[in-house]
Amino acid sequence: MSARQISVPGRRREPLTDSQLLMAITIGIFVAMYAAAMVFMGGGFLRTQQFFDLLNDNAALIIISCSLTIVMIGGGINISVGGVISFTVMACSIFLNTSGIPDSTLSILATFLLALLIGLAFGLLQGFLISYLDIQPFIVTLAGMFLSRGLTTMLSVNPVKVTHEGFLALVKTKAAFSWLGYTAKNGNLIPAKLEIGAIAALCVVVLVYLMLRYTSLGRHIYALGGNQQSALMLGINIRRTRFITYVLSGLLSGLAGFVFLMHKPAGNASVAMRSEMDAIAASIIGGTLLTGGVGNVIGTFFGTMILATIQKIIALSPLNESWWQEMANGAMLGLFILLQSVILSHRGKGRKEANEPKKRGRTKPQ
C-alpha cells in the first residue's frame, strides 16, 4: 500500500479563539454593509476607487487604531493619540516651511524623523509614568492629551499650510492600478489610485499583526492583558511589557501624524479632534476588549472601515447632518459591545461546562 493510500485520522479542528470569532463577526458585518451599499446606493460604491478613498481618508485613523489595539490588549488605554497627531502635524508643517534644508529629500526625511521623535517622546514619558510609577493610564494619557493640544496651540494659533514644494509633490504621488479602474463616459480609462499614506497604514496593520501573532512580545502582551498574576507566574516582566506597549503606541501616533500631513498638508489646532474616541471605537468594534487579553488588529482594521463606510453612506444620503454620523457610530458601538458580551458569556459558560467532570453514567465500585 502506497503512502498516499494510508488514511490518517484527521485531527479535530481547533475551535476559534475569542479574538478570531469577534474578528470574523466584524469582517462579516463590514462585507454585508458594503455589499448593501453597492446594491442600494450604487454609484461610487460600485467602483474600486470608493474603497480606496476609504483607505486614503482614514489612513491615520487606521494607524492609531492599531496603536490603541496594542495598548488595549495589554489591559491599558491611551487617549492622547489624537493630541499627539495634532502636535506632530503642526510641528512638521512649521519645520518644513522654516527648516531651510536645501536638499528636498533630506528635508522630508528629517521631517519624518521629527514626527517619530515626537511620538516616541510621548510614548516614553507616558509609558514610564504608567509602568514604573503605577499611575493610572487614563490619568496619564488624559494629561498627555491636554499637553499635546496645548503645545499645538503654542506653536501656532492660526492654520499653517505647507509650502514645501518637494513635500507637496510627495503628497500628489499615488500608486495607480489601471486594472482596478473604470472607463469614463468619454472612453478614457480612470485608474484606481491609492495614496502613500494608505499603503503605509496597510503595512502597519500587517506588521502589528505579525508582531502580536508570532513574536514573544505579542504573547507577553496578550498574557499581560489576560491575567497579570498568571503573567507574573510565567516569568513575564509585566512592567517592561506594558512600557513597550506605550512606546509602540507613541511611535505609531507620530507616524499617523506624518501620514495625516501627507493627506492634508496643513497644521491646525483642531486636527484629529476626537480621533482618539474613533480609534477606541474602531478597536472595540474590531473585537478588542477593554478588559484586555482579547483582540486582533485585522479586526481593528475592519472596525475602522465600518466607521468609514457609515460616514460615507450618511454623507451620500439625505441624512447628512453631523449628528446622524455620531448617532450611527454610537449605535454600532453599542451593538458590538452587546454582541461581545453575549458571545463571550455563552462561550465562557460552555467552557465551564466542558471542564466539569461528567458524573452521569458513573457507578460506584462494588
Image (cartoon, rainbow, N blue to C red):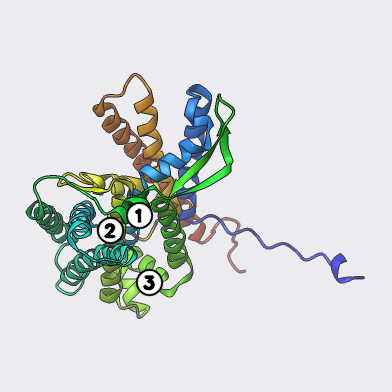
**Residue 95 on image: x %, y %:** 19, 60
**The disc labelled 2 sits on which kind of residue?**
Ser
Counting residues from the start of the chain, the first of labels 2 and 1 encountered is 1
Which quarter of the rendered picture does the C terminus lie within? bottom right
Mark yes or no: residue 10 visible: yes
Please name whichever residue, 241 or 120, is drawn nearer the observer in this view of the structure.
120
Separation of residues labelled 3 and 1 (CA atoms): 21 Å
Counting residues from the start of the chain, the first of labels 3 and 1 encountered is 1
**Residue 176 on image: x %, y %:** 51, 46
Mark 3: give few (<14), some (14-19) or many (20+) Cα within 10 Å: many
Under circle 2, the secondary element is: helix
Mark 2: give few (<14), some (14-19) or many (20+) Cα within 10 Å: many
292 vs 113: above or below: above
Left or right: residue 44 compared with residue 268: right
**Residue 220, numbered circle:** 3
Separation of residues labelled 2 and 1 (CA atoms): 7 Å
**The disc labelled 3 sits on which kind of residue?**
His
Left or right: residue 340 compared with residue 357: left
Residue located 51% across and 61% down the image: 357
Residue located 35% across and 63% down the image: 226
Please name whichever residue, 90 or 240, is drawn nearer the observer in this view of the structure.
90
| Residues at discs 3 and 1 in contact (Cβ within 8 Å) | no
Residue located 15% across and 45% down the image: 159
Residue, disc 1: 63
Separation of residues labelled 3 and 2 (CA atoms): 22 Å
| Residues at discs 3 and 2 in contact (Cβ within 8 Å) | no
Residue, disc 2: 253
Mark 1: give few (<14), some (14-19) or many (20+) Cα within 10 Å: many
| Residues at discs 2 and 1 in contact (Cβ within 8 Å) | yes
